[in-house]
Amino acid sequence: MIKTLLTFFLFLSFFSVNCSQDQPANKKIMLGSDILLSEKFDLILNKRLTLLVNHTSLLSDGTHLLDTLLKINQVKVLNVLSPEHGFEGNFSAGTKVTDTTNKDSSLHFFSLYGKTLKPTDEMLNGSDLILIDLQDVGSRFYTYISTMFYVLQAAAGMNIPLIVLDRPNPYSGNIVDGPVLKNSFQSFIGIAPLPIIHGMTIGEIADYFCGEVLPGKNLRPDIQIIKMQNWSRDLFYDDLDLKWIKPSPNISDFETILVYPSTCLLEGTNISEGRGTQKPFLQIGAPFINPEDLINELKKFDLSGIEILSTQFIPQDLHGVAESPKYEGKTCNGITISITDKLKFKAVKFGIQLISSLIKLYGDKINFREEHFDRLIGNSTVRESLMKQIPADDIYNSFTDELENFKQIRKKYLLY
């Protein structure tokens, strides 16, 4: 026992040294996973664990949480659950991922984006505790929070407690924008009544799910959030001293995270959102677009924090990144979007202005994938208003009241 404790404290000492390099301890962000291992290890001591993790589940020193836990004798990792894109984050959007087993350790890797979206009893049997550690991007339709929702639901049904290891919202914790999802439009790309940009950390989202009894009226997950240290709501990801890692194949850099809530809406149309190129979501287009006409139309709006340039691209099938993208092999004309001021840019507003401009210029050529678009935006009203060519800014202002109501509910779950 003495030898075991000595090994554990040596590990903590080494971990603490790693976390304090490059920056004073009171400045460096300490993730929830860092705090778990350095200050709250007793919560997992002698526990049999199931992890909901992927390639983003790194400690602040760059080591993976799973690798770290597998080296500690005082815990037992039973199973690993992974969300869309797989454990290694190398499957393109929408690709079903199969379960695997590590032959060396007999560790089971269960996909929650394959045969099932919700953990089965088999995946959780024997677990004393579930650890959740995923890097979200701050947008409602990014599916990692949907996977977490189903894990909360399954854990509550089996009376298994959970710990969420908190991480920064890369979009900051202050920006909240977009229509709030209507319950009738709930789907895996919109699991709960949230605006498009929710301004919450993944721990706060989990708290919101449970506090609003969203997993089910008779399901009360036993959940604990391990907060970060030295993170504040005004910080964006590029303000942090953390290694950047792509959360998914088409979110290639921080700038893409900022633009994603606007151009992802084009997934619900016949306009290319840039998949199959080196700049997904940062460039959009179609064969019939005249870039200069589109830019001139967009300039009629009071655009802030953004630069728009004309571009031309040919989408290609990129294995593990974009399978069969729109207009594969065809020349698309469109625009490239660059952020000049992240505080001034309003992504949701720009998305509505962009689609409104496209309809005005090319109304007879613009097609909606109606069900998909409505699930992305969270209602059918926005699409119907766009088709009627109601002014874009009027559409944007139409959901002000519901957004303010959500902000009041959200206050109960803010941890920072």
Image (spheres, rainbow, N blue to C red):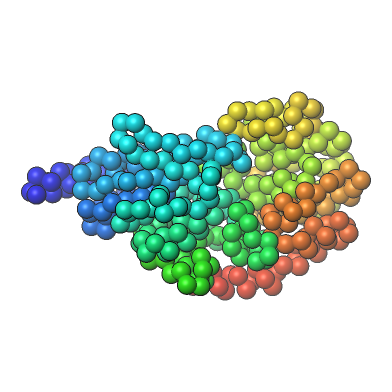
Q: Residue at x 69, y 73 (%)?
A: 401
Residue 126 can be seen in this image: yes
Q: Residue at x 64, y 33 (%)?
A: 322
Residue 340: horizontal and vertical position, in percent? 65, 45
Q: Is residue 74 left or right of residue 289?
A: left
As drawn, 347 above or below 296 = below
As drawn, 400 above or below 283 = below
Q: Residue at x 40, y 50 (%)?
A: 122
Q: Nearer the viewer, residue 221 or 202?
A: 221
Residue 382: horizontal and vertical position, in percent? 78, 60
Q: Is residue 387 left or right of residue 182?
A: right
Farthest residue to the front: give it: 122
For residue 302, which quarter of the picture?
bottom right
For residue 40, which quarter of the picture?
bottom left
Farthest residue to the right: give it: 364
Q: Residue at x 64, y 60 (%)?
A: 186
Q: Is residue 84 left or right of residue 125?
A: right
Residue 131 can be seen in this image: no
Residue 29: horizontal and vertical position, in percent? 38, 51
Quadrant placement of the C terminus:
bottom left
Farthest residue to the left: give it: 2
Q: Nearer the viewer, residue 244 or 372?
A: 372
Residue 187: horizontal and vertical position, in percent? 63, 56
Disc tally is 0
Q: Is residue 173 left or right of residue 4?
A: right
